[in-house]
Image (cartoon, rainbow, N blue to C red):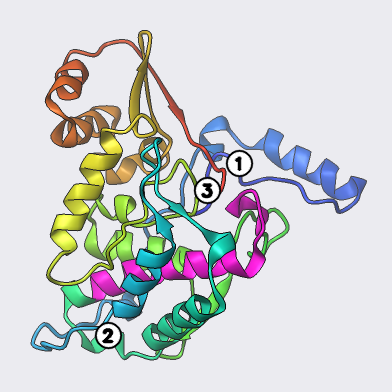
Amino acid sequence: MSRPPTSPYRIRPAGLAAVALAGMLCLALPAAALQAAPEADPWPRWERHNDRNGLHIDHGAWREFLQRNLLVEHPSGIHRVDYAAVTRVDRLILDGYVKLLAGLPISTYSRVEQKAYWINLYNALTVQVVLDHYPVKSILDIDISPGVFSNGPWGAKLLRIEGEAVSLDDIEHRILRPLWRDPRVHYALNCASLGCPNLAREAYATFNIERLLEAGARAYVNHPRGVRFAGDTLVVSSLYVWFQADFGDSREGVLAHLRRYAAPALAERLAGWSGGYDHAYDWALNAP
């Protein structure tokens, strides 16, 4: 999950003129625009693949990093990265892993290898960026994206792959979302926030990607930060509002998606629901 569509005009201290301009921009934009997520805009450069290539990428370094630094036994059910406890050795492992992925000719690999590659790279890059700026209370505080009103790190070109400068936004909105059109990708990408789907403790790979995507969907839909009822109001994660186009492109489509992964009792309640509808998201850092 990338930049927060509901608040793209967070103002930095830049003088009264900038504040006044920001105010005019917000007033001029309709409410719907403030809720809009980045569109899935395919980058044709990354459509190339070779399904005859049987090579598998070794994601062992990322798996090792996660097993030592990802805390999964929290009463809330939300996985947390112990950023403060990451050792120098583990940081070297992480940095080496990202460098390894960036150096691969990924366009020559099979589609399933590419899908796992981009998911793992996105998650490893996100952890790397947080560590680069830690301590922070939220990933929103890492304002390295270009643009006066940009929030967070998602627009910054963080590395080069096959000669192309690539950002987290590129990976999510120009590669994974448009090229695979799999809504479960949203459950795999972690934005270092409590409201986000859990960062998986396993690295994604050819042999486990379907299992992990399905498990991630079920875990999030059946957790209160994904779906809950507050009286007569159904409160869903803002992911389902920001990215409604990926989840059936309508409220009814979102509900159908939720019912597919909901436990029986929740699915039954969703099937008969006819009350209010709201959404929420917690951007606090997913740290202990």
The x and y percentages for residue 151 are 63, 54
Q: Do the residues labelled 1 and 2 touch (CB within 8 Å)?
A: no
- The image quadrant that residue 41 belongs to is bottom left
User: Which stretch is magenta?
Assistant: 114-142
Q: Distance between the residues labelled 2 and 3?
A: 37 Å
The front one of 128 and 87 is 87
- For residue 74: magenta? no
Q: Is residue 255 above or below residue 93?
A: above
Q: Is mark 2 on a helix, strand or loop?
A: helix
The front one of 40 and 137 is 137
Earlier along the polypeptide chain: callout 1 or callout 3?
A: 1
Name the residue at 44% across, 28% down. Answer: 279
Name the residue at 20% across, 85% down. Answer: 109
Q: Mark 2 points at which residue?
A: 107
Q: Is mark 3 on a helix, strand or loop?
A: loop
Q: Say which amino acid is labelled 1.
A: Ser
Q: Name the residue under label 1.
A: 7
The front one of 27 and 72 is 72
Is residue 264 something one can see in this rendering? Answer: yes
Q: Say which amino acid is labelled 3.
A: Pro
Q: Mark 3 points at which residue?
A: 288
Name the residue at 47% across, 70% down. Answer: 125
Q: Distance between the residues labelled 1 and 2?
A: 35 Å
Name the residue at 31% across, 64% down. Answer: 176
